[in-house]
Amino acid sequence: MSSVIDRRSIEAIVTRAYFELVFVSWAKNGSRAVLLAKHGNQEIRLLELRSIDAARMPSLWVELYATDAKMSVDACRCDDLEVATLAAEHLISQAAGLNDNDAS
């Protein structure tokens, strides 16, 4: 039962973040991001990357980012919000595990 609630909560967070992306300015590197969750030094972000080909839509990613190392730890390309929700669920779990390992 709790996994259904967790998935629905994550789905709501991802959907909200997707709509928030339009209010975020594009960075010089052609990306924009919205924070989904944070565990210690690990951030899970919904990331949109501008395509080099102007005719193509930007690609959507969910990224696990280490703020202390200032680098991406893992990322999943997402074709739609359902896939983004599954990726976010996976990366949130991964970030929690990394945070637990850092605490030990």
Image (cartoon, rainbow, N blue to C red):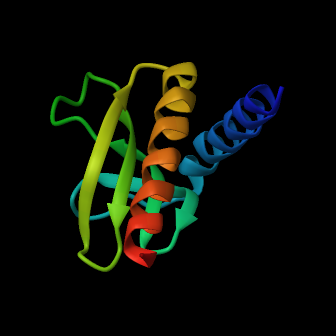
Residue at left 45%, top 67%?
99
Q: Nearer the viewer, residue 70 or 28?
A: 70
Residue at left 26%, top 22%?
55
Kindly give the residue lying farthest to the left in the view shown.
52
Q: Nearer the viewer, residue 93 or 12?
A: 93
Residue at left 37%, top 48%?
63
How far across and how far down the image is residue 45, in percent? 46, 53
Residue at left 35%, top 74%?
67
| Residue 71 image-quadrant placement | bottom left
| Quadrant showing the N terminus | top right
| Residue 4 image-quadrant placement | top right
How far across and how far down the image is residue 69, in percent? 23, 76
Q: Is residue 82 visible?
A: yes
| Quadrant showing the C terminus | bottom left
Query: Total marks drawn?
Result: 0
Q: Is residue 91 left or right of residue 2?
A: left
